[in-house]
Amino acid sequence: MKSQSTRRDFVLRGGALLGAGVATTTAGAAALGGENVDAAADLRKSGDVAAEREAIRRLHLTLLARVEQQDFVGVAELFASAGDWRSSGSRDAVSMHTAYRQTSAQRLDDIVVSEDGMQASARFHVEAEMCTPIQGDCTAAQMARLQGNVASRHWESGRFEVKYSRVGEQWQIASLLYFNS
């Protein structure tokens, strides 16, 4: 005759096994003098840092999207009140970014959050489309503008060096530098 097992029997047997595991872990933690408590705190802290890094990545992607959409009011909202954006090394002082694309150098991207969680810095690699308005009033420039070509465009590899500060519960850009490679 086959014995039938009930849910209650299963839970009771499983509870005994679970209880033994918890008791063993608790005894081990006590024997280690609280080192597991420190490890748990470190694990929580690393989880918090990962969440902060993800928030900074999302902020950076929002910045890129707003630049591509030419939403410059929206771009300004991402910066702290004294925020600063500088583009270094571009070929022409009037060049501006109009689009971005991925690059293999993104594997070198990094984000570092300060111990107190109030400051961060990041390096993001990117290819930027540089747009320079066509200058001059010569015939070639006039013809180009009449055909809808108001700027010359080229792609260049570069990187953003960014400093962030926490304002309330949000990260804001404190300074952003762009360097072409």
Image (cartoon, grey):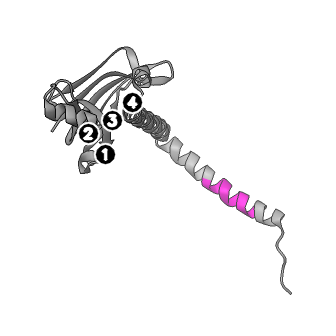
Question: Which residues, given as a range, are shown in magenta?
Answer: 13-21
Question: From the viewer's perspective, is residue 66 above or below residue 36?
Answer: above
Question: From the viewer's perspective, is residue 122 above or below residue 125?
Answer: above
- The residue that disc 1 covers is 101
Q: Nearer the viewer, residue 70 or 151?
A: 151
Asked if marks 1 and 2 touch (Cβ < 8 Å), the reply is yes
Quadrant (top left/top right/bottom left/bottom right) for the C terminus = top left
Does dot 3 land on a helix, a strand or a loop?
strand
Residue type marked 3: Ile
Q: Is residue 151 visible?
A: no
Residue type marked 1: Arg
Ranked by sequence position, the earlier of labels 4 and 1 is 4
Q: Name the spot of residue 56 as percent of width and height, x first.
A: 41, 33
Q: Name the spot of residue 179 as percent of width and height, x first.
A: 19, 32
CA gap, disc 2 to disc 3? 24 Å
CA gap, disc 4 to disc 2? 13 Å
Asked if marks 2 and 3 touch (Cβ < 8 Å), the reply is no
**Numbered badge on residue 129:** 2
- The residue that disc 3 covers is 111
- The residue that disc 4 covers is 70
Q: Mark 4 or mark 1, which is nearer to you?
A: 4
Ranked by sequence position, the earlier of labels 1 and 3 is 1
Q: Nearer the viewer, residue 121 or 94?
A: 94
Residue lying at 22% horizontally and 26% vertically, measured from the top left: 87
Ranked by sequence position, the earlier of labels 4 and 3 is 4
Q: Mark 2 or mark 3, which is nearer to you?
A: 2
Residue type marked 2: Glu
Residue type marked 4: Gln
Does dot 4 land on a helix, a strand or a loop?
loop
Total residue callouts: 4
Q: Name the spot of residue 54 as percent of width and height, x first.
A: 44, 38
